[in-house]
Amino acid sequence: AVAEAMAQVDLGLLVVPAELRAVAGARRVASAAGMALRDLRVVVARGPAPGGLDVEEVAGLLGLPLAGE
């Protein structure tokens, strides 16, 4: 049922904190969601954590187009 619902979506946005561990988890989600979604993009959430990744780095590591931050 979830895959059928996702197949009806025009655009999927994956919101990911700009942290390495979050990107690692998001890669697994993007891999699974990418099979059902025609257009999956990333939105990078910046938080108070020091040493966060750059928004372009997050998009590049995920292999997804950047939709915003």
Image (spheres, helix red, strand yellow):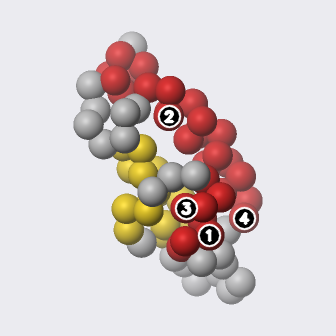
Under mark 2, the amino acid is: Gly
Q: Is residue 44 visible?
A: yes
Precedes in sequence: disc 4 or disc 2: 4
Task: Give me the C-alpha separation between circle 4 and circle 3.
Answer: 12 Å
Task: Give me the C-alpha separation between circle 2 and circle 3.
Answer: 14 Å
Q: Residue 16 placed where, x, y %?
A: 54, 59
Task: Give me the C-alpha separation between circle 4 and circle 2.
Answer: 20 Å
Under mark 1, the amino acid is: Glu
Q: Is residue 18 visible?
A: no
Q: Residue 49 placed where, x, y %?
A: 65, 81
Above or below, comparing residue 4 to residue 55 in the picture:
above
Circle 4 residues within 10 Å: few <14, some 14–19, many ≥20: some
38 or 50: which is nearer to us? 38
SS category of the residue bearing label 2: helix
Residue named by callout 1: 57
Residue named by callout 2: 34
SS category of the residue bearing label 3: helix
Q: Residue 18 placed where, x, y %?
A: 60, 70
Task: Give me the C-alpha separation between circle 1 and circle 3.
Answer: 5 Å
Circle 1 residues within 10 Å: few <14, some 14–19, many ≥20: some
Precedes in sequence: disc 2 or disc 3: 2
